[in-house]
Amino acid sequence: MSEKEKNNIDAILNRWPYDQETLNVRGAKGEDGRDVIQMRIDMGVLQLETTGRPDGDKPFGFDTFYDYLLAEELRDDDFVLDEEQCQAVDREFVQFYHRRICWLSLREFAAAMADADHTLALMSFCEAHSPDEQWTMSHEQYRPFVLFHRIQAAALAELEEDAAEAAIHQINLGLDKLHDLYAEHDAEEVFEDDELVARLTDLRESLRDHYKVGLTLHEQLQDAVTKEQYELAAKIRDELARRIAESATE
């Protein structure tokens, strides 16, 4: 077989046609038997590693470029990202975005949450050590979207365990985080009309209707405190503590 024939991927592309209406993702095996993720794109295929960096690279010997930056921060209290590091950060953001949406498509919700957490932490690092406010905002503008994926994954992970009430609680926790984010930027009015907020609210109410879930214990607690029904609130707290203790022993 010639070198050109070895490098030919026509058969792969022909067997897996691109569909612009859906996210084309599948699990596969690497040549050495390791698990990988493949995403069919318009003119080819992306292959992503399932651990560490999606491209399999180890920047300066670290699992991710973010891990390398944390080490650099420890060496220099006044650390500021330079242009080359900013470009490397941009690359890592894109890679983790691709893998995050793949995990969601594959219903690997814990992995999606972990990749979202990585991106959020990297965003916070960039905000603290950015050389330029405009570059910072080029990433910060996507924080609500990453949070949305994180909230969605957390709720669906609970749902896979038949825990509809816990799924609703995860959505409420996430909505609180989104509200705090908008409040931090003096944009609370945006929160009320935000499409991501609306989608999460719709998901919560559809779960409530489908699984016949009334107010969760956390919602009942908040309602009791708001109405100054402190004796009821104490009973609800006791029940929450009991449930937490039970889940810890399972």
Image: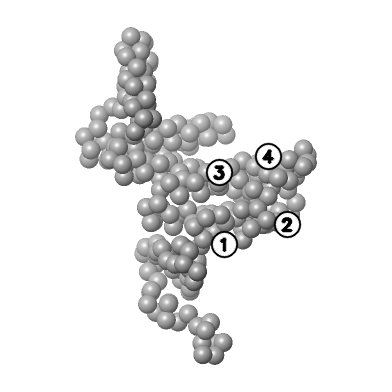
Q: Neighbour class for label 2 at 10 Å: few (<14), some, many (≥20)?
A: few
- Label 2 with label 3: CB-CB less than 8 Å: no
- Left or right placement of residue 84 versus residue 237 in this view: right
Instruction: Name the mark on residue 84.
Output: 2
Q: Secondary structure at mark 4?
A: helix
Residue assigned mark 4: 128
Residue assigned mark 1: 55
- Left or right placement of residue 80 versus residue 155 in this view: right
Quadrant of the rendered structure where residue 74 is?
top right
Looking at the picture, which amino acid does disc 4 mark? Ala
Looking at the picture, which amino acid does disc 3 mark? Leu
- Label 2 with label 4: CB-CB less than 8 Å: no
- Left or right placement of residue 148 versus residue 134 in this view: left
Tell me what residue is drawn at x 40 percent, y 64 percent.
26
As measured in the structure, the alpha-carbon distance from the residue carrying label 3 to the one carrying label 4 is 13 Å
Q: Position of residue 110 (x, y in %)?
A: 43, 46
Of labels 4 and 1, the one closer to you: 1
Residue assigned mark 3: 120
As measured in the structure, the alpha-carbon distance from the residue carrying label 1 to the one carrying label 2 is 18 Å
Tell me what residue is drawn at x 44 percent, y 57 percent.
102
Q: Secondary structure at mark 1?
A: loop
Q: Is residue 10 above or below residue 18?
A: below
The disc, 2 or 4, on the residue closer to the chain's N-terminal end is 2
Of labels 3 and 1, the one closer to you: 1
Looking at the picture, which amino acid does disc 2 mark? Glu
